[in-house]
Amino acid sequence: MAARPCAAMRALSVFLVILLLPSIARSYEPEANGFVIVAQPLIRYVPTQQHLREWCGAPGEFEACTRFIGFRLEASCGPAGDQWILDATATFRPWIFVKGSAHLAHEHEHIRDVERFTAEHVAGLRALLFADADHCRQRSIHEAARFGETMKAFARRSNEERHPALAGARYEREKLRMARGWESKSVESQMEEGPRRETRDHRDRDDVERVRKRESLEMSRRSIAHDLETARTETHRAALQNALTFIDGELKKLGR
């Protein structure tokens, strides 16, 4: 008989944590820098270490991780005297997976790192000067196409700066990933979009922005669909399917 109250208390504690997490998420306040937009983080409470490993796609013992979704870099070219400049902005949304609310503050530190790295990156792009519109446009296409890889690099940098022990293992991890061809394939698939984007230069600014937003959503969808193929639990699969449904809804609004 004593087991029932304990089970009830555990269920109540989980329920309270789930209710508490959204209010904690709102405690994250992005920096007001004008050209990096960080959407409010999504938070998912994960009950076990195995579930956390599946969501985060990483082995070992840890209490939380953050993935970045809905990321996109928007860049347009404009004249500045006899030269051309990039008007660039970046957007992303953090997705936190955590076993307990005590670790949310630390994940916020990682998010702020990535926000800072992104702001520095965009500021560097905005400071560039180009001799003509074609060179400016080519750089904007290149940066937009590889922004997913740029975000991954920022996430790794934050991990290694805040957890120095991870830096020593990076070389072996990079060799393994490159051997699998995953990252190189990702870069190539994004770069293939370049020529297709150039054919759309005659469209007005609103159409170009809509296309870029759709391509960013499609890139996020491919990543989540890949995770769905390897998901091991029904809970994991259901959450990924919900994410796909949300993205499909956004794509439908854009006239996919």
Image: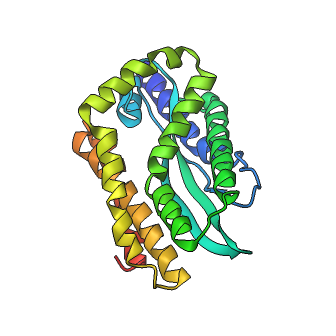
Inspect this view and state whether residue 44 appears.
no
- Could you say which is closer to the camera, residue 125 or residue 32? 125
Residue 250 visible, this angle? yes
Between 118 and 44, the one nearer to me in the picture: 118
Q: Which residue is at the far left?
A: 229
Q: Residue at x 56, y 73 (%)?
A: 133
- Name the residue furthest right: 32
> Number of labelled discs?
0
Specify whether 191 is left or right of 9.
left
Compared with residue 66, is residue 189 higher up or lower down, i.e. above or below? below
Answer above or below: position of 131 versus 12. below
| 32 or 149, nearer to the observer | 149
Residue 224 point in image, percent of width and height: 34, 50
Q: Nearer the viewer, residue 146 or 226?
A: 146
Rendered location of residue 221, percent (x, y): 35, 57
Left or right placement of residue 234 versus residue 166 in this view: left
- Report the residue at 62% width, 53% height from top: 40
